[in-house]
Image (cartoon, coloured by chain):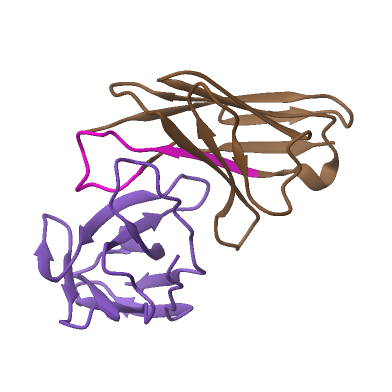
Chain colours: A purple, B brown
C-alpha cells in the first residue's frame, strides 16, 4: 500500500481557497486517490476521489499531475465549518475489498 | 448515498466486561467491512477486515481473541471487545463500500466512543 505524506497542519481564513498537497511517491498503477474529512468524534466523510488529471465536485477539486506521485485537494472559499482533519489515501479501486490505511492527516484550522 | 449505521454511539462499561458494537450498511450490501480504532489527536488505525461468511483478517498487533468480529450477513458486522480494560477506551469506527458506488470511496459509521472504567 502506498504511503502518503501530508502537512501536519494548516491555517486559513474564511473565504480563502485552501490547497492541501499529499505526496504518494510509491503509488501503484491501479491505485486511486481519495480524500476524506473528519470532524471530532465523527467518522470520516468522503470528499473526492480521482485517478488522474482533475476531478471536481460540489465541494472540492482534486488535481493530480501526470506522474501521479502527488495530489492536491482544493477547497474553494473555506468557512469556519471546514475546520477539520483531512486525510489523503491511496489504494486500488476494487469492489470494496482494499484496505484503507490512514496517514496522519492534515489538521486545517479556519479562522474568522 | 450509501449509509453506514453504527451503534451504540457511546458506551461506558466496567473493567472485565464485554461490549458489542454493531455496524450496519443500511441501503447496500457489504461483503467487506473494516474496523478502526482512533485515540485522541491520532489518526485512524485499521484493526481488522470483516468478511461476510468467513473469518476476519486482523492487522498485526491486534488480538483476535480480544476483539471478536462477526460478519454474519451482508449488512451487519459486529465488533465485541472482550474483557475490556481502561486501555481499550477509544473511538471505534467501521466502514464499508457499496459495490455500485465505486467512485465515492468508503462510507464510515459515526463511531462508538468506548470508555472503560
The vertical placement of B24 against A8, above or below, is above
The vertical placement of B99 against A92, above or below, is above
**Residue B12 appearing in the image:** yes
Residue stretch in magenta:
B91-106
Q: Quadrant of residue B2?
A: top left
Quarter of the image with the N terminus of chain B in it? top left
| Residue at x 32%, y 56% (from the top left corner) | A92
Between residue B37 and residue A81, name the one nearer to us.
Answer: B37
Q: Position of residue B37 (x, y in %)?
A: 61, 48
Left or right: residue A15 versus residue B42 is left
Point out the residue furthest to the top here.
B73
Q: Is residue A45 magenta?
A: no
Give the total of numbered labels.
0
Q: Is residue B102 magenta?
A: yes
| Residue at x 32%, y 70% (from the top left corner) | A28
Q: Quadrant of residue A74?
A: bottom left
Q: Position of residue A64 (x, y in %)?
A: 19, 76
Between residue A62 and residue A19, name the one nearer to us.
Answer: A62
Quarter of the image with the C terminus of chain B in it? top right
Left or right: residue A56 versus residue A17 is left
| Residue at x 22%, y 44% (from the top left corner) | B102
**Residue A19 appearing in the image:** no
* Secondary structure mainly formed by the magenta segment: loop
Q: Position of residue A98 (x, y in %)?
A: 40, 49
Q: Position of residue A42 (x, y in %)?
A: 47, 45
| Residue at x 28%, y 52% (from the top left corner) | A93
Between residue B21 and residue B48, name the one nearer to us.
Answer: B48
Left or right: residue B49 versus residue B113 is left
Q: Quadrant of residue B80?
A: top right
The vertical placement of A14 against A31, above or below, is below
Amino acid at each position: 500500500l502506498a504511503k502518503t505524506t501530508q502537512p501536519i497542519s494548516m491555517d486559513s481564513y474564511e473565504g480563502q481557497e485552501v490547497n492541501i498537497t499529499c505526496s504518494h511517491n510509491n503509488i501503484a498503477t491501479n491505485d486511486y486517490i481519495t480524500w476524506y474529512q473528519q470532524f471530532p468524534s465523527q467518522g470520516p466523510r468522503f470528499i473526492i476521489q480521482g485517478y488522474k488529471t482533475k476531478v471536481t465536485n460540489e465541494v472540492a477539486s482534486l488535481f493530480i499531475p501526470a506522474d501521479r506521485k502527488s495530489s492536491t485537494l482544493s477547497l474553494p472559499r473555506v468557512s469556519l465549518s471546514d475546520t477539520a482533519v483531512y486525510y489523503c489515501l491511496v489504494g486500488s479501486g476494487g469492489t470494496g475489498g482494499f484496505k484503507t490505511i490512514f496517514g496522519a492527516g492534515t489538521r486545517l484550522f479556519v479562522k474568522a | 448515498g450509501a449509509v453506514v449505521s453504527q451503534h451504540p454511539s457511546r458506551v461506558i462499561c466496567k473493567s472485565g466486561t464485554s461490549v458489542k458494537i454493531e455496524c450496519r450498511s443500511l441501503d447496500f450490501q457489504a461483503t467487506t467491512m473494516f474496523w478502526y480504532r482512533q485515540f485522541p489527536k491520532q489518526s485512524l488505525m485499521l484493526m481488522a477486515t470483516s468478511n461476510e461468511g468467513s473469518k476476519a483478517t486482523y492487522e498485526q498487533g491486534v488480538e483476535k481473541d480480544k476483539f471478536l468480529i462477526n460478519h454474519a450477513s451482508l449488512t451487519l458486522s459486529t465488533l465485541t471487545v472482550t474483557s475490556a480494560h481502561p486501555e481499550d477506551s477509544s473511538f471505534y469506527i467501521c466502514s464499508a463500500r457499496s459495490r455500485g458506488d465505486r467512485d465515492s470511496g468508503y462510507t464510515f459509521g459515526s463511531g462508538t466512543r468506548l470508555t472503560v472504567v
